[in-house]
Image (cartoon, rainbow, N blue to C red):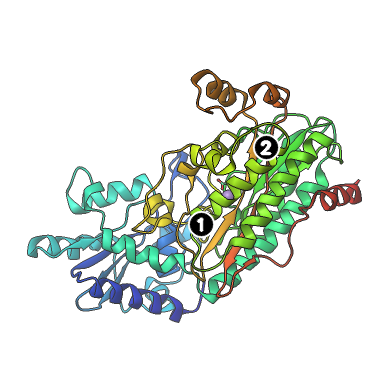
């Protein structure tokens, strides 16, 4: 947890933002509850709600809070442990001491959160709440507010105020993100050094995730480690490592402070790239470098996405896989055939930061519209960059036979795609290269103490050093 002043200040800023937006009434936060996996006492690994962590820091289940926008009063609702809890969980600090640790003046039992909510309902005072990320919180809100659906009542001013705060990382968060990226670097290094022909992918996953578990909270999302990188979120790890393949490893650590890292590297399983692999790898590498070089305040990440799309098409054009005017191809959306995802996303307490609050609200400025095109339409962060934004840059090239066939059959590639040449890439797989980047006042810096080897020669040297 951060010092008490951090949480106090954040809540004061939030209340002030709400007042400045002309809002009044209550802000209601519901922390997460334990989620049973098979039965009540065997739960999924505990994880607190990220907005709760941001404003309250308290990393425990069954807590709620009410902030009064008009009076500034803050109340924490939680229960002190009783003897049954002590038998199973041991003694716990009092609710009062937990409230003190984050600077909250009033406490009340968990169930008593109904009281201010009822009072506000009766007197017609607005009750602001965020879109919940879990079903329990949805049900609890439905119960408290007495409505069959809570979607329409989600507070846009509150959502916008929270996003505006969480998007711009404070120094204390940047230090936490650097630490998460240091662990991510360590985990990825173990993964890379564990690649060996004949072993099952799962064994590499086990070795690498042990770093996340030994030194942090765990992984920040289910690890992607696959010789079928063309399947973007491939979570199967049953395959044996074969020669001549490309292995995509896309994985991150969540630190004990719950900040995420998210790196991707792609390795030739045999230790050296084939010429064909290297040609495509070089293009993705150049796109990654270009994205970083363009990342600075004032530029939109949409522009950076489009610039890397152009670079990618330039490289694919040189290989004869596409042909035509580069700007026309970008406008037509040809890059989406090879990279059906966006260049990156926000990162912070969540690996895809705040997407529970609404992808477009988080990733798009009010004057920006999300495109519908394949690839660009999946861009989760398009905003004009500001110092303090933390984003990923993760260009990729994938050869997805079913998608190429669809483009061919339905004429989706216009006259730009050389389908005959693409046939020899149907068993190529995919390549993605991802770093985590902080936007600084003058440009950008990659998070973490070191950058994972990424230039093709450096990747081969790192693989050779481990064998
Ligand atoms: N690294 C996984 C993702 O960004 O979706
Ligand atoms: Mn990512």
Where does the image place residue 359, in percent across and percent down from the top left?
41, 50
Where does the image place residue 197, in percent across and percent down from the top left?
85, 34
Q: Secondary structure at mark 1?
A: helix
Tell which circle, 2 or 1, labels the residue nearer the N-terminal end.
1
Name the quadrant of the C terminus: top right
- In the rendered image, the residue lying farthest to the left is 123
The answer to whether 131 is drawn above or below residue 375 in the figure is below
Where does the image place residue 429, in percent across and percent down from the top left?
69, 32
The answer to whether 125 is drawn above or below residue 262 in the figure is below
- The answer to whether residue 358 of the structure is visible from this angle is no
The image quarter in which residue 408 lies = top right
Give the number of the disc on residue 317: 2
Q: Residues within 10 Å of mark 2 (few under 14, many from 20)?
A: some
Q: Residues within 10 Å of mark 1 (few under 14, many from 20)?
A: many
The image quarter in which residue 426 lies = top right
Give the mark toward the camera: 2 or 1.
Answer: 2
- In the rendered image, the residue lying farthest to the front is 325
């Amino acid at each position: 947890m951060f010092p008490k002043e951090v949480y106090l200040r954040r809540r004061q800023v939030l209340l002030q933002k709400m007042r400045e937006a002309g809002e009044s009434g209550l802000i209601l936060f519901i922390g997460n509850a334990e989620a049973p996996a098979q039965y009540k006492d065997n739960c999924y690994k505990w994880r607190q709600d990220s907005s709760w962590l941001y404003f309250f820091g308290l990393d425990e289940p069954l807590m709620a809070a009410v902030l009064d926008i008009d009076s500034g009063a803050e109340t924490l609702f939680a229960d002190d442990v009783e003897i049954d809890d002590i038998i199973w969980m041991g003694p716990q600090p009092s609710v009062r001491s937990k409230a003190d640790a984050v600077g909250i003046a009033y406490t009340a039992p968990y169930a008593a959160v109904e009281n201010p909510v009822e009072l506000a309902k009766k007197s017609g005072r607005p009750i602001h709440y965020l879109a919940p990320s879990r079903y329990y919180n949805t049900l609890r809100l439905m119960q408290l507010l007495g409505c069959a659906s809570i979607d329409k009542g989600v507070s846009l001013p509150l959502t916008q105020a929270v996003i505006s705060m969480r998007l711009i990382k404070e120094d204390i968060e940047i230090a936490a993100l650097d630490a998460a990226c240091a662990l991510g670097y360590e985990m990825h290094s173990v993964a890379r050094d564990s690649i060996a022909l004949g072993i099952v992918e799962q064994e590499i996953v086990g070795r690498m995730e042990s770093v996340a578990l030994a030194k942090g909270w765990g992984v920040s999302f289910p690890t992607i480690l696959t010789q079928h990188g063309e399947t973007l979120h491939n979570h199967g790890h049953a395959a044996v490592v074969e020669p001549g393949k490309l292995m995509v490893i896309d994985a991150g650590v969540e630190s004990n402070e719950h900040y995420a890292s998210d790196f991707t590297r792609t390795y030739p399983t045999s230790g050296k790239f084939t010429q064909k692999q290297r040609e495509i790898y070089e293009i993705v590498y150049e796109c990654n470098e270009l994205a970083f070089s363009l990342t600075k305040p004032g530029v939109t990440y949409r522009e950076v996405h489009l610039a890397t799309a152009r670079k990618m098409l330039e490289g694919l054009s040189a290989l004869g896989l596409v042909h035509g005017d580069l700007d026309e191809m970008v406008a037509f959306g040809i890059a989406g055939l090879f990279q059906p995802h966006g260049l990156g996303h926000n990162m912070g307490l969540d690996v895809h930061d705040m997407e529970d609050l609404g992808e477009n609200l988080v990733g798009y400025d009010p004057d920006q519209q999300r495109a519908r095109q394949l690839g660009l339409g999946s861009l989760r962060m398009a905003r004009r960059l500001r110092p303090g934004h933390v984003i990923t840059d993760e260009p990729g090239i994938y050869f997805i036979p079913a998608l190429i066939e669809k483009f061919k059959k339905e004429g989706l590639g216009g006259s730009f795609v050389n389908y005959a040449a693409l046939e020899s890439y149907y068993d190529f797989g995919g390549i993605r290269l991802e770093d985590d980047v902080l936007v600084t006042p003058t440009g950008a810096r990659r998070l973490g103490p070191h950058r994972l080897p990424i230039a093709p020669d450096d990747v081969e040297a790192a693989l050779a050093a481990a064998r």
